[in-house]
Image (cartoon, rainbow, N blue to C red):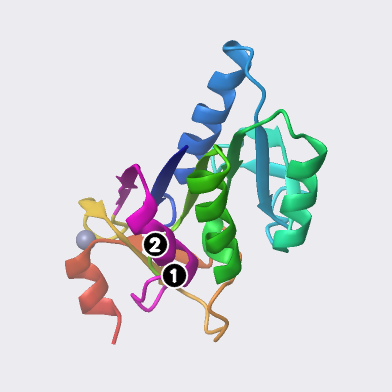
Amino acid sequence: MCLNMICGSMYSGKSTELLRRYERNKYAKRKALLFNHSLDKRYGENVVATHLQDQEKSHSISTVYQMLSILHDHKEIKNVYIDEFQFFPNEFADAVIFLVEKENYSITVAGLDLTFDNKPFKSMEKLMPYADEILKLKAVCCECGKNASKSYRLTSSKQKVEVGSNDSYIALCKKCYNKIYK
Ligand SMILES: [Zn+2]
């Protein structure tokens, strides 16, 4: 029915915005499901949390099958929120598109749009043309204080998806990113 995306760099407030929208359902007495990736254990399993320490109970999953089976068990709920969507493989994007376009779901995803080396995250990129709304949030550049849209990694790990702890990434604006990233 409706696909909403919340994207941006690290520390841009994506999970905060996702949780804000998710929590509105409670006040409206509407049922909703919250998912996150099981890789994201920063704050424990089955919980979506923000850097500001807000948290909500969620379903931690890693495969499309897990998500579909939970949706199947809650057939009456058509309102779905997914955090850290960049962690999920492409087939997740296909499933989300199908659920929204053909099965009457309203889905909101939050995720990083760019990798630390400034490439699009595939699952996010795939969803974008199907989104009804895309909100791009900005962090604050650690170097100059302007709006930041890049995530820069301070550690040397080669893994593309590294679950961000507070000390392994910083947010930078384009100018500062280009100065530092070579
Ligand atoms: Zn800057």
Q: Mark 1 sits on what residue?
A: 121
- Ranked by sequence position, the earlier of labels 2 and 1 is 2
* Location of residue 52 by image quarter: top right
Q: Name the foreground residue: 25 vs 10.
A: 25
- 68 vs 19, left or right, is right
Residue 44 spot, x, y in % from top left: 77, 49
Residue 26 spot, x, y in % from top left: 63, 17
Q: Residue at x 53, y 68 (%)?
A: 168
Residue 113 spot, x, y in % from top left: 39, 62
SS type, badge 2: loop
Q: CA distance from mark 2 to mark 1?
A: 6 Å
- Figure check: 117 above or below 142: below
* Location of residue 19 by image quarter: top right
- 117 vs 1, left or right, is left
Residue 125 colored magenta? yes
**Which residues, given as a range, are shown in magenta?**
115-140
Determine contact: label 2, label 1, CB under 8 Å. yes
Q: Amino acid at mark 1?
A: Phe
Near mark 2 (Cα within 10 A), the count class, few <14, some 14-19 or many ≥20, is many
Image disc number at residue 100: none
Q: Residue at x 46, y 74 (%)?
A: 154
**Residue 59 seen:** yes
Q: Mark 2 sits on what residue?
A: 113
- Figure check: 161 above or below 63: below
Residue 89 colored magenta? no
Specify whether tag 1 is near ligand 1 (CB below 8 Å). no
- 119 vs 80, left or right, is left
SS type, badge 1: loop
Q: Name the foreground residue: 117 vs 97.
A: 97
